[in-house]
Amino acid sequence: MAKQIDIEINLDNLERSIGKLAIFELQFQKAVDDGLEEFSHRFRDKLVENISKYGLPVHDILASIHIYQADNTLVISSNDEQLAYIEYGVGLIGSQSPHPKWTDWQYDINEHGYKGWVYYPETDMDFAQNDVIIRTIRGSTIAWTRGHEARPFLYHTWLWGTRSIHQIVMKHVRRIKID
């Protein structure tokens, strides 16, 4: 429900009224900034919860995700393209359990099907839970997979965020005291 704000402008003392408006503007901007700051912390907490829910390496993923404020916007970005494959899934298994907001993501682009494919993981984040891991005599690791299902940790966090941001920011706006 919208909060009505009544501001009395005294024409006999216009300078004072303009000063009150300027103070309100500063209070309002601070309330929005504080609300976005609280939201960004809670968003990060929800992100950790959703990453954990899928059994993914929280530290590795969080290290590649950047959450910051730009103007009155919360920006979530990553320079790790691998997160898209984790989020949307890949291969035959991914196509059987797609992302809830699937758009034009292609799951088995090389048509490996049931035979799957072999790859060389560099970190623990590079392979899915159901992949077959083989350690060679020389110590290198080879993995075989048919892909993995979508693990939409970002989508679920975004969904929570779209449902929560207004409430969190408005909590701060409602605290503004108008004299």
Image (cartoon, rainbow, N blue to C red):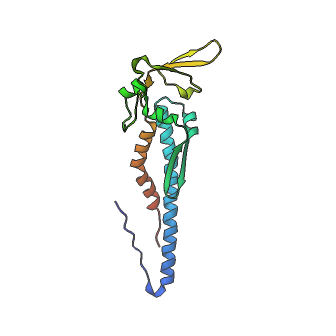
Q: In this view, does 85 lie above or below 46?
A: above
| Residue at the top extreme, as displayed | 137
Q: In which quarter of the image is the N terminus?
A: bottom left
Residue 144's spot in the image, x, y percent?
50, 18
Residue placed farthest to the front in the image? 110
Q: Is residue 159 left or right of residue 52?
A: left
Q: How many labels does the image show?
A: 0
Closer to us: 139 or 130: 139
Relative depth, front residue between 119 and 63 = 119
Q: Quadrant of residue 146?
A: top left
Q: Give residue 86's position: percent from left, percent from top.
A: 47, 32
Asked if 15 appears above or below 70 in the picture, the reply is below
- The residue depicted at 50 percent of the width and 63 percent of the height is 29
Q: At 51% across and 43% down in the image, what residue appears?
A: 44
- The residue that appears at 51% across and 38% down in the rendered structure is 48
Extreme-left residue of the structure: 1
Of all residues shown, which one is farthest toward the bottom?
Answer: 12
- Above or below — where is 13 with respect to 140? below
In front of the other: 95 or 25? 95
Q: Is residue 162 left or right of residue 66?
A: left
The x and y percentages for residue 116 are: 44, 19
Which image quarter: residue 171?
Answer: bottom left
| Vertical comparison of 129 with 171: above or below | above
State the image coordinates of residue 111 (x, y, percent, origin top left). Answer: 40, 24
